[in-house]
Image (cartoon, coloured by chain):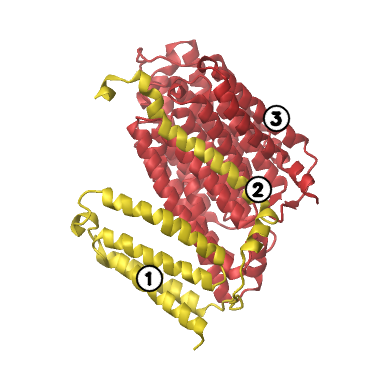
Amino acid sequence: MDIKEILVLSLGVITILSAVYISFSRNLIYSAFMLLVTLCGVAGLYGLLSADFLAGIQILIYVGGILILIVFAVMLTQNISEGKKSNPSRFPLVSLVIGIVFLGGMGYFIWRFPWNNGYFSFKPITTDLGNALLKEYLLPFEVISILLLVGLIGALTIARVSLGNKNKLTKDDEI
Amino acid sequence: MGLLEQVYAIAPEMVLTAGIVVLLFADFLISNKKKYILSIIAFLFYAGALIVLINSTMTGNTYLFSNQIHIDGMGNFFRCILILTGLITIIYSYNNPEMKEIMAGEFQVLLMGTILGGIWMGISSNMVMIYLALEFVSILSYIMTGIRVRNAKASEGAIKYVLFGAVSSGIMLFGLSYLYGLSGSLELSKLGVYFQQAQLEGKIFFILMLVLVFGGISYKLAVIPFHSWCPDVYEGAATPITTFFSVGPKIAGFALLIRFFNEIFPVNISQPQLSNIFFIIAIVSAITMSIGNLAALWQNNIKRLLAYSSIAHAGYILAGIPAYSQIGNHAILYYLMVYLIMNVGAFLVAMVVGGDEDLNAFDGLAYKSSKGAFWASIMTIYLFSLIGLPPLAGFFGKFYIFSALIDKNLYWLVIVGIINTVISLYYYARILKAMFFNTPNSEQQMFSPIHYQVLGVVLMILTVLFGIYPQMILSMWNN
């Protein structure tokens, strides 16, 4: 066995086992912390597939940002440690059937399909990515900047109105 | 082609982008009492974009920015119709009482952004651009729904919109990621090349993933089963914004759908496996028009009624996709243009009548005053067109769709469509009956300024004119 295969397999096992734990744990706090392991495992897989930039971004944004947000949201919610209240498992049979059908169908096609295996190589891609962003993907790159601008304005609009209306509070609001 | 020439080709989009920036700055330079100037500025920018578009020298088929966008007759049609939507929206949202609680500058910026995103949806030919454009329109739509603060219904609608949007975006991205994995390219035309060379198994997998992408797009079209956000969003948002939602994002969604299929499979190439996905779309279309029409029968709120009516019309338009041909595409484009006109018209009268959006507000509209009679007669034209009575534009919309279907031997879908037209007669006729046969309730106050009257008459004339000369729109697509 190649060292690369061992790495891929062990990272895959870690990712899948932690993902299974997240799904089956009744305690949301444990799930949230276990998400850390899953996300890091996925980042490792990205790195092995020579997507080093994506791996770094995965750590920065998902592990560093979104996960912290989820943990805070979980901890600020009441009664979160009682599994029966936070995630009552409803319709287990139906979900099981749907899940198995979906997994089986996808698995069959992924298994049978002749995927292109030629992409395995360790080569940093960040330079190529930078070039692509300013060449082939120049237009999407610029459109994203407009989207961010307009989205920012929208977010401010929704957040600001309650402040802006302070000088004309109605009776209900004064309480 | 050099970069500068490519930038010239997207001049209308550049004008709209400049418009967004100018509106932002103008908003804090103009005092609160003179906010109407913003509407005028926005109007000028839309008009400018339209003039630039009409005068542009770009003709024929061009792929620009390394195949990110594809500008052709269809793309220009969608650019044109979306900018027109923006223009009309500016007119009917001007001075509307419901818009007073919404900050004018931010509304104009968001509206122009949504139009811009819709245009990207209509011309993109790359999966990155498609996803980006779809999110562009979606995110701004969520904000425009929730922009009315301290309104429980608006918040409910916005939250539902966000949740549905996030789920369906996820479904669509999942499908797109596999399409990329299969073909190794983000360009839609390369996907088609892959499909033609693929083995049978690859083709089946490809089509399964196409179904997922169709699911993601179909939430923008509000077709079943991705429709349940629609009535709540329509009821929650301010009526002018609801009017915009019922046309703008929907036209953009159909633009994306047609573009997606046309880029992957050029219409003249026949693919036997494709009939699977078109069969699914045909079923979705039949269910959408049936449930939309049946649900509309029980509505007493005019906005909810028009929401379900717009779901049903999305079903009719969607029926043009299974009739996959040049005629089918033309039929969809024609129907979209007509739908824009008559639907905005019907919403316009709903805004005039106002009230608490109850159907009772229409009671005896024809006998209230001379203005009431004027609006009642205009509404009659719009309703007849929505039903699809000849010789109005709505009739030819349905006629073209059905004849394209008959060309492809999809008789059952035509029959479903005709039965649905009959069902829809009932709830549209309820409004007619309320206007002409019920006794007026006098306390209702009408909102009927001069620009509403002008817009109402113009839309009515277009409804009649496009019915008599349908070639007008069809020739537009060729130019």
Question: Mark 2 to mark 1: distance in Å?
Answer: 37 Å
Question: Mark 3 to mark 1: distance in Å?
Answer: 54 Å
The kind of residue tagged 1 is: Val
* One can see residue B206 in this view: yes
Whether tag 2 and tag 1 are in contact, CB under 8 A, the answer is no
Residue furthest to the top in view is B369
Residue drawn where x is 59% and y is 49% of the image: B256
The yellow one among the chains is A
Bin the neighbour count of mark 3 within 10 Å (Cα to Cα): few under 14, some 14-19, many 20 and up: some
Image coordinates for residue B471, horizontal then vertical, percent: 70, 38
Whether tag 2 and tag 3 are in contact, CB under 8 A, the answer is no
Quadrant of the snapshot with the C terminus of chain B? top right
Residue drawn where x is 46% and y is 43% of the image: B312
Q: Colour of chain B?
A: red
Image coordinates for residue B355, horizontal then vertical, percent: 38, 21
Horizontally, residue A159 falls left or right of residue B375, namely left
Horizontally, residue A67 falls left or right of residue B82, namely left
Q: What residue does disc 1 label?
A: A101
Q: What residue does disc 2 label?
A: B123
The kind of residue tagged 3 is: Gly
State whether discs 2 and 3 lie on one chain: yes
Question: Mark 2 to mark 3: distance in Å?
Answer: 19 Å
Q: Give the secondary structure at mark 1.
A: helix
Image coordinates for residue A121, horizontal then vertical, percent: 60, 76
Q: Which of marks 3 and 2 precedes in the sequence?
A: 3
* Tag 2 subunit: B
Whether tag 3 and tag 1 are in contact, CB under 8 A, the answer is no
The kind of residue tagged 2 is: Ile
* One can see residue B281 in this view: no
